[in-house]
Amino acid sequence: MNPPESKAPGNAIALDMSGVASAPNPGAPENSAKDLKRKGAAMAVSWGIGPTPFILTVHILGVAAAILVLIWSISYRGGLNWNAVNKNLVFNIHPVLMVIGFIFVSSEAILVYKSVPGSKVYRKGVHLSLQAVALGLGIFGICAAFKYHNESKIDNLYSLHSWLGLGTIILFAIQWIAGFVTFWYPGAAANTRRSVLPWHVFLGIFIYVLAIASAQTGVLEKVTFLQTSKVFGHYDNEAYIANFTALAVLLLGVFTVLGAVIPTASAEEEYRALE
């Protein structure tokens, strides 16, 4: 008679990106915690570094990107005003909310499971809440862009930036709703959560990368418009501020993804916390 099969939880696949999954020894449950810690330590060693330096870098780059976009929008573009007669002030709300409210906040949300101490439920709640804030501010930022276009008699949704941006926010909303009902309330069965989790992680990173790409095309589009209109030259201070803003956002995205995929010494337990 064959012994019953031992089912691996399948959690190591998406977190360590190694493509190798292994299950704890069912015959030695008392050692499972130590085994999990040993596995996570081995994965961290294989990268040669843990996620902490990348997480700290994300905090610094996020603040830098926020400062730069505020300097650009306020000092060079005149400020922010939803009801302004000068419609450029309405538009300025868009890059500020998309960089600070959408990208920076969602960066922090992605790294919650590695940067915030606390219980599984607490970290899950923080992750969900930060992503809700990012989604709300992102929607408001897109509304600002539509308001500017409509009141300035400019066509909507004709550029690659607008397609990427709208697609990103729609996918983000779908991802958030799916995550809420699967992992929070009412919550799916444990086996379903385990099956869905790798896809939730992958799609979350994919959507985040789309947001970074949208920001890059947005800065490029805005700078091209302003330089074509002779508002400033190729080597003026505003051009440098815009380029450094885009560069900070790009690096923020790179370090956020690295911080997310590089495992900690308790990687298996950390991954289970997402369930």
Image (cartoon, rainbow, N blue to C red):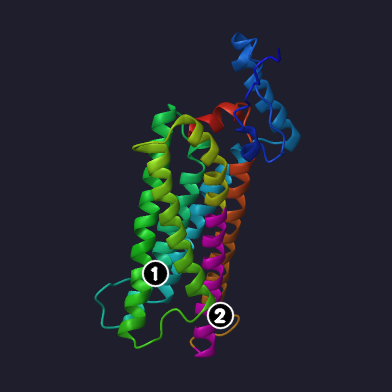
Q: Residue at x 60, y 80 (%)?
A: 235
Instruction: For marks 1 and 2, give the CA distance.
Output: 23 Å
Give the image location of residue 57, x and y in percent.
58, 47
In the structure shown, which secondary structural element does the residue marked by tag 1 occupy?
Answer: helix
Q: Which residue is mark 2?
A: 236
In the structure shown, which secondary structural element does the residue marked by tag 2 occupy?
Answer: loop
Q: Residue at x 29, y 72 (%)?
A: 81
Question: Is 225 above or below relative to 89?
Answer: below
Question: Is 6 above or below relative to 80?
Answer: above
Residue 31 versus residue 90: which sits nearer the camera? 31
Amino acid identity at mark 1:
His
Left or right: residue 159 compared with residue 257: left
The mark total stands at 2
Q: Which residue is mark 1?
A: 94
Q: Quadrant of the N terminus?
A: top right
Magenta stretch contains residue 38:
no
Question: Is 43 above or below relative to 240?
Answer: above
Q: Residue at x 48, y 87 (%)?
A: 231
Q: Do we see residue 90 in this rendering? A: yes
Question: Is 199 above or below relative to 119?
Answer: below
* Mark 1, other Cα within 10 Å: few <14 / some 14–19 / many ≥20: many
Q: Circles 1 and 2: CB distance less than 8 Å?
A: no
